Structures are given as structure tokens and as C-alpha cells.
Amino acid sequence: ERERLNRLKHTPSLTIDSQRVELLANIEMPEDTLGAVKVGAMGVGLFRSEFLFMGRSGNLPDEQEQYLAYRKAVEGMEGMPVTIRTVDIGSDKPLERSKHQETHLNPALGLRAIRWSLADPPMFLTQLRAILRAAAHGQVNLLVPMLAHANEIRQTLALLDHARSMLDIAGMAYGQVRLGAMIEIPAAALTLKLFLKHFDFLSIGTNDLIQYTLAIDRADEAVAHLYDPCHPAVLRLIADTIAECNLQGKGVSICGEMAGDISMTRLLLGLGLRSFSMHPSRILAVKQQVLRADASKLQAWAQQVLASEDPASLLQ
Ligand code: PEP
Ligand code: MG
């Protein structure tokens, strides 16, 4: 079976009815681009930049270190797009030592991801400058995690402008980026118009979207049996996000675990998704599902799944 999958590496990622489906890689370190290219990834859909920040005692990576890491990922993808997500520190991904290190009762609801970044503008500006500079070397998308509020969007965009003017003043080269927001808080999925006004593309983080929609800690074994990617409420938020982006001609991708789950591929294609980002080890198996799927025929069936009380029972 592995041999058969390996042969798909160079096969174009098209459905039976010739719909092009983008299969992207999730990476944690720049070196991971090697494995991504090896399985025929068409780009990086999620570079979890927090892995550059974790597991070090206190000192965060400075602008130059980050720039070199992002640039290495960009060059590693040989001209294909690389989506760099700003740090998603906090909750299940704590820093070794941080000035925000006090214990919090509900870290998943606390100062994590963009909230953590906005709480420390100099730190965030350092990362934004490094990403903008790396964009001079290839196609970079900048993705912001955990946004929920108009005010957070405004602050983020203002800091991005500020980062550009700092680079202008310093006379440093930088490139253009496409700007994306993660949809991983139900509030964001329910206010899509706001997001589509400000961003070029959206990326659905199903891991957190499921956690926050169902109030199930994604890391708590005691409630793992209730963590249901097929809950009708979860599917509704995903379906609406995909539909709204497609309607407005904006890019939309899924970068949570769901994108690499082959039991979900047909449903997501039927809902109109054409971009999936996943661990490189999942890419060829998902491509096999894509090659076997007739996307236009899956549309009506996907709507039935969406309307069902027990969607999972219809996926076999
Ligand atoms: C997600 O929440 O689905 C996601 C891709 O982000 P992370 O798993 O890094 O929180
Ligand atoms: Mg997330």
C-alpha cells in the first residue's frame, strides 16, 4: 500500500471531474520542508512558528534568527507558497519561561496566540519584521491565529503597518504577503464578513474550533470520547466558512487534523473545500481520496450529511 501511495507523488491532484485540489503541508521547523517536498506537497499551509520559541530557557529568538528560519522554509519549498503563522504560544504550547508565566485556571481561554502577541508589541513587531523580510525570498502568506474580535484585527493590522515602516526606515528589503486569519473560535466563524473584509484568505483550525464549539479540552483524556469532529454544529461552522469564502472568491483552507483524516475528505470536497493542509505523512493518502472523488456529485450528499443528526454514520 505504501508503494502504491508513493507512486501518487507526481500525479496531479485532481478529482475525477477535474477539480484542482491543493494539498499543503503543516510544519514545525524549517527542516520539515524536506519531508513536505518529498511527498509532493504543493506548499506549506501552516508553519507553526511557535516551535521556534518553545523549549528554550527564557530568551526568545531575535529578528535575525527568525528571519533566517523563515527564509530557510521559504527556500526549502522551492518557489511554492509558505504560510507562516504568527506564534500560537499558550495553552497546550507553553513557553519554558515567560513573563506571563503565572498559572491560569483556563489556559485555553487565556492569554494565548494573538492575545499573547498583542500583549507584547515589541515581541510581535520583531516577528512581523522577520516574516516580512523572509517574504523578499518567495511567496509568503502571513497567518494570524485565534482572532475573535474586530479590535484584535485592527491592532494586528496596525502593527503590521508599523513593522513595514520600521523596515522602510532601516532601509531593509522585504516582500509582499497575503494576509490570512485562522477561523478557530466560533465567534470568528459567526462573523465571517468582518474577517473577509480585512483578510485575503481564511484557514480553518478545526482542532481548536472543535474544542471551543463543544467545550471539550482537546488535550483532556477524560473527555476525549466527546471530542467529535462530526458534531453537526462543528460541521455547520466549517460549511458556512467554506461557502462564504467561495462566494466571495477568497482562499479558504483547513489546517487542523481534519484535513488529514481520509474519512472526511469526500465530505469536505462536497462542501466546496479545495485546499487542505496536513502533516506531510497524510498527504498521499488524502491525494488518493481526491483522485477517486467526483466533487460535483458529492455536493448534494454533503448537504444531507450536514442536515443529519448523526453525520458520522453517513461517512462510511
Ligand atoms: C487548529 O487549531 O486546528 C490548528 C491548526 O492550530 P493548532 O493545532 O496549532 O492549535
Ligand atoms: Mg489552533
Image: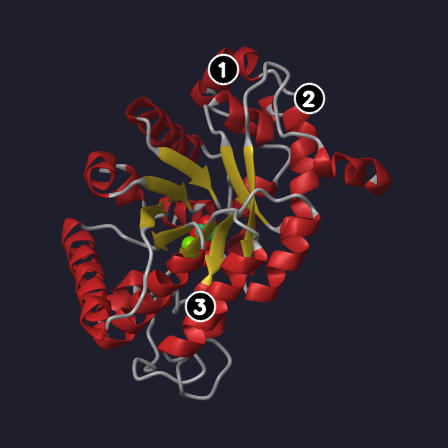
Question: Distance from label 1 to label 3 (Cα)?
Answer: 37 Å
Place of residue 245 in the rendered image (x, y in percent of width and height, measured from the top left): 33, 30
Q: Residue at x 44, y 58 (%)?
A: 137
User: Which residue is label 3 attached to?
Assistant: 50
The N terminus lies in which quarter of the figure? Answer: top right
Q: Residue at x 75, y 34 (%)?
A: 8
Report how many numbered discs are placed on residues in the image.
Answer: 3
Q: Is the CB atom of the residue marked by disc 3 within 8 angstroms of ligand 1's nearest atom?
A: yes
Q: Residue at x 45, y 22 (%)?
A: 306
Q: Identify the colour scheme used.
A: secondary structure
User: Which residue is label 2 attached to?
Assistant: 292
- Sequence-wise, the earlier of marks 2 and 1 is 2
Of the pair 116 and 202, the residue shown nearer to us: 202
Circle 1 — which element? helix
What is the three-letter code of the residue carrying label 2? Arg
User: Which residue is label 1 attached to?
Assistant: 299
Place of residue 61 in the rendered image (x, y in percent of width and height, measured from the top left): 41, 79
Q: Residues within 10 Å of mark 1 (few under 14, many from 20)?
A: some
What is the three-letter code of the residue carrying label 3? Glu
Circle 3 — which element? helix
Q: Residues within 10 Å of mark 3 (few under 14, many from 20)?
A: many
What is the three-letter code of the residue carrying label 1? Gln
- Sequence-wise, the earlier of marks 1 and 3 is 3
State yes or no: discs 2 and 1 in contact (Cβ < 8 Å): no
